Image: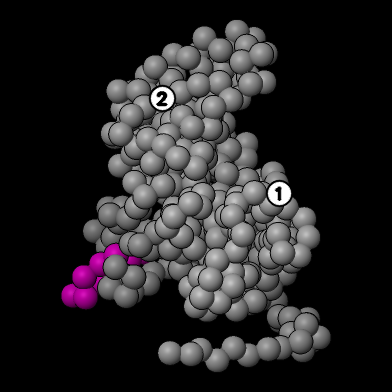
């Protein structure tokens, strides 16, 4: 069924955004549903002389039966604020509130992966774990095909699109830049963007972030991307293999280091970590996203889902050690296995527990 799209000029929007809020603010509560998608709803709060934090924000609730997170006979799921960001859509003093989902009996919701991840990060805080996640995604048109692809056909083979410049090579750069600016405004540690190998596919990187903040910032940056694409009437997919055939899939390459790995002689600790990861390969794959077997085939810059492997500067392995890291003898490594739709809390948690043991 066709969906009508409305068009409003920026000047028409601005006259409303500039209205006096009468000493009130709008707080957009954001959470992750059962399907790994962000949801949100707004509430009005009093403006304060001090900034809102997770500790002084009210707990809220939503209908979990409508998001796959609760049964209809006991549908209230509670939103406990855990991180606060400036709102790039409504502007200051309005805020975005990332929230954990909790059941009415005081237990974390089944789909609240942040809670256990935070405990692992706290237990390993002295290791100073740094993460950097590379989020690949694909823009889709209303026909659910990659944006800019010929109707009923295919573009030229891969080659000119990665980090491409110019018409016929890249699409929707303005949407990418809008997302980039929104993340910077909100204080997200976004470290860059680039066009990817599949036409219509892009990537942004978040990090390095310490501990639990990695998952928080990646989820909020995903929310921003979906919200901005909504304004342009464009869809975003995080599916790891949006197009079957001779096309690259989408991953969430995960860069990781500890203070020991970053220090002189750190290559020893990197190799020990990789050795510790190998016997947990199957366990990690279970945490690394849905439909990942369509992507991890051993082709198109991936390692095989069936076998753990690693190498220096090799993008066809499970784990890649950057050549600069090998040359310096310290730095970080990249886990190339996670799918683009993987939950960052699950990725970062299983990396820590596989290498350093469960708490």
Rendered location of residue 235, percent (x, y):
54, 71
Instruction: Determine whether 343 is above or below 20 in the image.
Output: above
Q: What stretch is highlighted in magenta?
A: 69-78
Q: Residue at x 48, y 14 (%)?
A: 271
Q: Which residue is drawn at 69% across and 67% down?
A: 172
> In the structure shown, which secondary structural element does the residue marked by tag 1 occupy?
loop
Rendered location of residue 340, percent (x, y):
47, 50
Q: Residue 309 carries which label?
A: 2
Q: Say which quadrant the C terminus sits in.
A: top left
Rendered location of residue 257, percent (x, y):
55, 25
- Neighbourhood count class around disc 1 (C-alpha, 10 Å): few under 14, some 14–19, many 20 upward: some
Q: Which residue is drawn at 28% across and 54% down?
A: 110
Q: In this view, does 45 lie to the left or right of 355?
A: right
Q: Which residue is drawn at 30% across and 42% down?
A: 286
- Neighbourhood count class around disc 2 (C-alpha, 10 Å): few under 14, some 14–19, many 20 upward: some
Rendered location of residue 135, percent (x, y):
56, 49
**Residue assigned mark 1:** 163
Q: Is residue 77 magenta?
A: yes
């Amino acid at each position: 069924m066709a969906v009508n799209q409305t068009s409003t000029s920026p000047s028409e929007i601005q006259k409303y955004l500039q209205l006096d809020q009468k000493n009130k603010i709008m707080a957009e509560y954001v959470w992750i549903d059962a399907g790994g998608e962000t949801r949100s709803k707004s509430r009005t709060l009093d403006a304060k002389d001090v900034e809102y934090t997770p500790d002084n924000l009210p707990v809220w609730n939503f209908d979990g039966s409508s998001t796959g997170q609760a049964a209809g006979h006991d549908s209230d799921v509670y939103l406990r604020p855990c991180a606060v960001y400036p709102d790039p859509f409504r502007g200051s003093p309005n805020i975005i509130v990332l929230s954990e989902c909790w059941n009415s009996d005081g237990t974390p919701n089944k789909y609240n992966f942040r809670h256990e991840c935070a405990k692992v990060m706290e237990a390993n805080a002295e290791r100073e774990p740094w993460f950097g996640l590379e989020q690949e995604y694909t823009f889709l048109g209303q026909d659910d095909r990659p944006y800019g692809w010929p109707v009923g056909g295919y573009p030229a083979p891969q080659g000119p699109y990665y980090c491409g410049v110019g018409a016929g090579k890249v699409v929707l750069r303005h949407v990418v830049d809008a997302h980039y600016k929104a993340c910077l405004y909100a204080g997200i540690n976004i470290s860059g963007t680039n066009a990817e190998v599949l036409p219509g596919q892009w990537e942004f990187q978040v990090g390095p972030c310490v501990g639990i903040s990695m998952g928080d910032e990646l989820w909020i940056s995903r929310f921003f991307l979906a919200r901005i694409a909504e304004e342009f009437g464009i869809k975003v997919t995080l599916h790891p293999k949006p197009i079957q055939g001779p096309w690259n899939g989408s991953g969430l390459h995960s860069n990781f280091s500890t203070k020991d790995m970053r220090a002189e002689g750190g290559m020893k600790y990197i190799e020990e970590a990789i050795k510790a990861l190998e016997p947990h390969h199957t366990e990690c794959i279970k945490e690394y996203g849905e439909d990942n077997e369509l992507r991890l085939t051993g082709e198109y810059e991936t390692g095989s889902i069936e076998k753990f492997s690693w190498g220096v500067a090799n993008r066809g392995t499970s784990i890649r050690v950057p050549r600069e890291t090998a040359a310096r003898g310290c730095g970080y490594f990249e886990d190339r296995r996670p799918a683009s739709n993987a939950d960052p809390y699950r990725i970062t948690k299983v990396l820590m527990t596989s290498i350093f043991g469960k708490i």
